[in-house]
Image: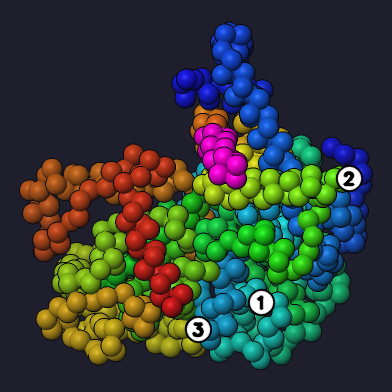
């Protein structure tokens, strides 16, 4: 495990609550980015991320350090997200709508000297995001875990409590569906 | 055109998840098929597209929000909070009577490695409902329960050593100032599997006041089974729901080595008085308080994936139930019959007094018996059992809910269900033996047998489960 993480964890366990802030700062963007893709809602992603960090702190004594802190944190976040989903079917607020509501600009704006290129990139990103949102929850979840977190099939299976074969099949279907949606969308644009 | 199998192989190949034999097949495929190579290229593009999706910036303040949340709770990593805390707050907010049934002194001998035990058993102090709640804010029953749960430092693990928190709060305050961390560590043994009959303690806070909650570990199967038999025997309509298998990281109260732990709730559809009167006969329960079933449903995260065990009951709840009252009546007659385990000798051994929902000791209530019970209908009219059955519909006003919560392993739930199924099978196969049972009236019609080959494979039940739960959700949402 990352020695910096371990130091922060040790300080937390010794009663230094503020040290946990270091872990939050270190991993909040990564966790949030994955959760937004997985949940399709920035509000929900933000809430789940916060819940996950709080839970992680409360359970810090059970973290044995067998895996990286972030992996452990991500499991907590995924389970917290699943728990929220069980509790209520939240009408998803699209990322687009959130941007309009909050006025926040995308964090991941890749620099480009060509404004038209930037526009194309933005449009393409919107297309992908929309297609991703349209996937079934379980398909989107496995694909995001694979693409964003680079989890092994076995790890995903363990997280979801399903066979590895199911993970493999879901990822394949998610890719295929995404591919078809994007192809259709691009053709329609042309 | 690539076959779906080939496409899936390519997808797994792209992820580097193929075994050597499959890898060889894919290599051959890629050598021979332009389409396969193009598909692999598309997978690459899709992967990049997903990773490059623009995401609005994380709102400022997450770090501060997290720290603000954990600062006052700093000691609590050492004191796990029971899961029901999550739904207890809304229950309080709605000024509903408080929870909880407390099972005590279950004398069960089981090996420590057996997962069929409940750790966070059924019992907790209302002080855990909300740290910000002060004693004066609590209802009478809550304060009573609080008094039940508080102990002094000198006797931290003795369930009998309870006392009223007020006005003797000074001792509790001293707990806090002395060595709260050391106390928590001492009270809560980590890494050990709970053993039925074992008394455990939990340190929580009520405002600035630390409160020690004692609880007794019970055998889940036995406790749940006893409760169900008892409720049925008293003609109390109920359902049992379980959550899906809990992932170990969801809450702060995971059970060590039991990642498939589930939570069980008994939802009771009966007037409060009837439930309380009946439960006064249940020796293991010290206190019962009602909550609304819809609150249990909503806030206990028994969402659409929750599963109900007694589907026949569930079926009854799904629609206007014209057969419920006759079933209750038949159940009461059975209960009143001589030799009935629930209604017979057990009834006569009532203690001198019991705790009521109001928290005051009172003479034991008369046991519900045939002809004595009344059933409240949805419009509040009280029908005698002898009156003609009326359609009954589950509504918020008619639903009293009792939440009894415990952790249970998936294996155990499966065993319970299979046992129930086989029992019915035996009854169907050997009707004569049932007929020779002493003074036992014919059982009410049984529903279709459950296809029980494990919880995970009961897809056929899903729609029924969902239907039930949607009914409950409608009550709360509208």
The N terminus of chain A sits in image quarter: top right
Residue shown at the point (75%, 45%) measured from the top left: A121
Residue at 54% x, 34% y is A176
> Residue placed at 7% from the left, 48% from the top?
B432
Coloring applied to the structure: rainbow
Query: Which numbered disc, 1 or 3, marks the residue that appears first in the sequence?
Result: 3
Mark 1 and mark 3, same subunit?
Answer: yes
| Residue closest to the eye, B278 or A6 | A6
Residue B224 percent coordinates (x, y): 41, 59
Q: Looking at the image, can residue B188 be seen?
A: no
Please provide the residue range marked out in magenta.
A173-190
Tag 1 subunit: B
Judge if badges 1 and 2 mark residues of a common chain: no
Residue B96's disc number = 3
Mark 3 crowd level (few <14, some 14–19, many ≥20, 10 Å Cα): some
x%, y% of residue B430? 11, 44
Identity of the residue drawn at 45% across and 75% down: B476
How far apart marks 1 and 2 lie (CA) works out to: 55 Å
Which chain is mark 2 on?
A
Name the residue beneath numbered marker 2.
Answer: A113
Q: Is residue B306 visible?
A: yes
Position of the C terminus of chain A, as image quadrant, is: top right
Residue A14 included in the magenta stretch of the image: no
**In front of the other: A109 or B167:** A109
Total number of numbered labels?
3
- Secondary-structure class at tag 3: loop
How crowded pointer 1 is (Cα within 10 Å; few <14, some 14-19, many 20+) is rated as some
- Which tag is nearer the camera, tag 1 or tag 2? 2
Alpha-carbon span between mark 1 and mark 3: 15 Å
Report the disc number at residue B130.
1
């Amino acid at each position: 495990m990352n020695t910096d993480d371990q130091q922060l964890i040790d300080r937390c366990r010794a009663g230094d609550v503020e040290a946990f802030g270091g872990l939050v700062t270190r991993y909040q963007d990564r966790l949030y980015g994955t959760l937004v893709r997985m949940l399709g809602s920035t509000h929900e992603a933000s809430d789940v991320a916060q819940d996950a960090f709080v839970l992680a702190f409360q359970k810090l004594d059970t973290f044995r350090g067998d895996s990286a802190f972030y992996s452990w944190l991500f499991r907590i976040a995924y389970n917290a997200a699943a728990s929220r989903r069980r509790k209520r079917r939240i009408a998803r607020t699209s990322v687009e709508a959130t941007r309009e509501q909050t006025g926040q600009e995308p964090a991941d704006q890749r620099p480009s000297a060509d404004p038209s290129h930037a526009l194309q990139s933005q449009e393409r990103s919107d297309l992908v995001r929309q297609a991703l949102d349209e996937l079934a929850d379980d398909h989107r979840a496995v694909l995001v875990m694979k693409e964003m977190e680079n989890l092994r099939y076995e790890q995903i299976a363990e997280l979801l409590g399903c066979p590895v074969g199911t993970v493999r099949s879901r990822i394949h279907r998610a890719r295929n569906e995404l591919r078809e949606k994007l192809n259709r969308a691009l053709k329609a644009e042309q | 055109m690539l076959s779906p199998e080939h496409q899936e192989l390519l997808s797994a190949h792209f992820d580097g998840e193929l075994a050597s034999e499959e890898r060889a097949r894919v290599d051959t495929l890629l050598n021979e098929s332009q389409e396969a190579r193009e598909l692999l290229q598309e997978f690459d593009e899709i992967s990049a597209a997903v990773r490059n999706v623009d995401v609005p910036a994380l709102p400022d303040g997450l770090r501060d929000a997290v720290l603000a949340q954990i600062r006052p709770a700093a000691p609590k990593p050492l004191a796990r909070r029971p899961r029901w805390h999550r739904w207890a707050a809304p229950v309080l907010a709605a000024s509903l009577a408080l929870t909880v049934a407390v099972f005590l002194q279950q004398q069960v001998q089981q090996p420590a490695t057996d997962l069929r035990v409940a750790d966070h058993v059924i019992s907790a102090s209302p002080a855990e409902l909300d740290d910000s709640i002060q004693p004066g804010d609590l209802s009478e029953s809550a304060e009573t329960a609080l008094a039940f749960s508080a102990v002094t430092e000198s006797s931290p693990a003795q369930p009998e050593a309870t006392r009223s928190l007020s006005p003797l709060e000074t001792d509790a305050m001293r707990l806090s100032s002395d060595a709260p961390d050391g106390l928590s560590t001492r009270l809560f043994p980590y890494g050990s599997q709970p053993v039925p009959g074992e008394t455990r303690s939990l340190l929580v806070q009520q405002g600035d006041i630390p409160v020690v909650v004692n609880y007794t570990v019970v055998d889940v199967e036995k406790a749940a089974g006893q409760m169900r038999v008892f409720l049925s025997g008293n003609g109390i309509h109920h359902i049992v729901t379980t959550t899906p298998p809990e992932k170990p990281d969801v809450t702060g109260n995971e059970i060590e080595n039991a990642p498939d732990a589930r939570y069980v709730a008994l939802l009771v559809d009966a007037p409060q008085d009837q439930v309380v009167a009946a439960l006064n006969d249940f020796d293991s329960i010290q206190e019962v308080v009602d909550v609304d079933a819809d609150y249990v449903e909503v806030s206990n995260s028994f969402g659409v994936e929750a599963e109900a065990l007694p589907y026949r009951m569930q079926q009854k709840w799904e629609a206007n139930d014209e057969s419920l009252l006759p079933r209750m009546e038949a159940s009461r007659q059975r209960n009143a019959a001589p030799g009935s385990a629930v209604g017979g000798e057990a009834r006569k051994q009532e203690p001198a007094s019991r705790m009521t929902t109001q928290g005051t000791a009172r003479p034991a209530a008369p046991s519900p018996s045939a002809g004595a019970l009344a059933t409240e209908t949805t419009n509040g009219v009280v029908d005698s059992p002898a009156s003609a059955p009326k359609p009954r519909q589950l509504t918020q006003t008619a639903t009293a809910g009792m939440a009894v919560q415990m952790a249970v392993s998936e294996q155990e739930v499966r065993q319970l269900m299979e046992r129930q199924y086989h029992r019915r099978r035996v009854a169907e196969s050997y009707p004569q033996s049932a007929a020779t049972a002493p003074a036992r009236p014919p059982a009410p019609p049984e529903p279709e047998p459950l296809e029980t080959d494990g919880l995970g494979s009961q897809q056929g039940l899903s729609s029924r489960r969902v239907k039930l739960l949607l009914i409950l959700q409608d009550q709360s949402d509208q």
